[in-house]
Amino acid sequence: MIASLLAVTMLSGSAQAIAKQGGAAAASPAASTQQAASRPNVLFILIDDLKPAIHGYGDPIAVTPNIDRLIARGTRIDLAYANQAVCAPSRINLMTGARSTTSGIYDFGMNLRDFMPNAVTLPQYFMKAGYRAESIGKVFHIGHGTVGDPQSFSVPPHKDHVIEYVDPASLAVGKTREAALFNEFELPDEDVWEYARTLPKGVAWEDPDVSDDAYADGRTAEYTIGRLDALKGSKQPFFLAVGFARPHLPFSVPKKYWNLYDPAKLPMPDFERLPEGAPAFAGKVGGEIVAYTPIPEKTPEAQYPEELKRKLVHGYYAGVSYTDAQIGKVLDELERTGLAQNTIVVLWGDHGYHLGDHAIWTKHTNFEQATHQPLIFAGPGVGKGVSTRQPTETVDIYPTLAALAGLPPPTGPQKMDGINLKPVLENPETRLRGYAYHFYNRPHRWGQAIRTEQYRLVRWTHDQTGERVYELYDLVGDPGETRNIADEKPEVVKELDGMLDRQPKPKPLPKPKD
């Protein structure tokens, strides 16, 4: 079953020449050629596991000159949130404009067309308006039983690796658990999760002295450059979705990006326990991080050796800077070809990331570190060098991009939850909605959350008994979410709880896995 989904397009040094050849013609556009030609292009940059660890977002450690220059010519959204801090559902939120609680897609292996067979995805909507839509790199999440959606694009998606090693010591391990889960090689015809458990762990990081294109993200940038060069003279506007894998684990990053950081000056976790008064199920133990070596499986995260914690933080920031450099190459090509003036650029991280805070690593929680994501718009119709604190959800991107491109408001046929933020991008002081909504579940418990400019309320509802447990955090007075103040602020809980009650009723939870 899984084996048929395994093809990985690999690029050689001639990638740009291959990229310029393009692919099959786009589907017949609904708009006239003249109408389509007047539309702006779209370059949508997706980054895996990127929280706002960006200098232009105020991170003093991050070396991100290229994302910073995109911020300087666009609008930075300071309070953007994933609707769910899981890679596959978050990308489906983006592509459909529908929250996980609307679609019922909460986990890996829950595929778009099984739940919304007639959905018109974001790139499909642009295709109907006469655009050529292409997918390069990691756009939809493919792996863990989840498939992509080739019908969302004018030509077959161009995929590359997510799990990749080049250091001989790393390669000597052979086929690894995470490589199997990401379909990086042909799998036997059996349950992928069971098969992956039979394989050794891959290494959590490597830092060989190699060129950028030794890894997939470097090749993705190279391929994108070729496509931009090929498309520069076309009368048909394009929608290029370009996905980068780092800083997702493993932190396989060329040495020069590790060398940008002094390990002694890295931001280390300083609150390594759950918030005071938080229920135990609000946290997370283990998970993705223990799929790699030398991460210990039985040791509580707060008790990881200091050297290990520092290395993981170092690897994450090295990954951020590596991806930033690839984005810089793409932005340079956009300028060189003259396309920048008429191209809307969006940069989006699919969710945030824990780096030891609350004794948690990676994502899969309702805390700020897991849900807070970078979101930047630049180009025609967008304010330059400004920021906004309009609370924003991933699902808002679909209708906003349609409006920026001058297209009619999208209407599905899937139920869409997002709002058009174009007025905010024209005037960052505008407020269209006072909150962002997000969600993460635990076995038998709904974890619905409302994030305002000051507070986050998480309401945990038992799906059988109806019992409710609340968390409330003041993100202005307590940005690290160290103390649950739900009992101290009943009036705030009541107000935000009412906001949750006014949201559409969530689709049923999947049955807990054994």
Image: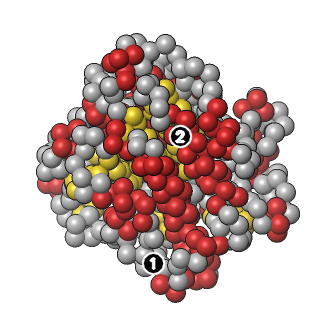
Dot 2: element: helix
For label 1, the SS is: loop
Of 396 and 151, the residue lying toward us: 151
The answer to whether 58 is drawn above or below residue 165 in the figure is below
The residue located at (27%, 27%) in the rendering is 406
User: Circle 1 sits on which residue?
Assistant: 267
User: Does residue 196 appear to the left or right of 223 in the view shown?
Assistant: right
**Numbered badge on residue 229:** 2
Where does residue 462 sit, x and y in percent of width and height? 41, 43
Residue 176 sits above or below residue 400 on the image: below
In percent of width and height, residue 216 lies at: 66, 52
Residue at the spot 27% in from the left edge and 30% down from the top edge: 403
What colour-coding does the image apply?
Answer: secondary structure
Between 362 and 183, the one nearer to me in the picture: 183
Specify the amino acid type for callout 1: Pro
Q: Residue furthest bottom?
A: 264
- Quarter holding the C terminus is top right
Q: Nearer the viewer, residue 399 or 9?
A: 9
Query: Does residue 312 lie above or below 73 as drawn?
Result: below
Q: How many marks?
A: 2
Q: Position of residue 488 (x, y in %)?
A: 19, 64
| Residue under the image location 68 percent in, 38 percent down | 18
Graded by Cα atoms within 10 Å as few (under 14), some (14 to 19) or many (20 or more), the crowding at tag 1 reads some
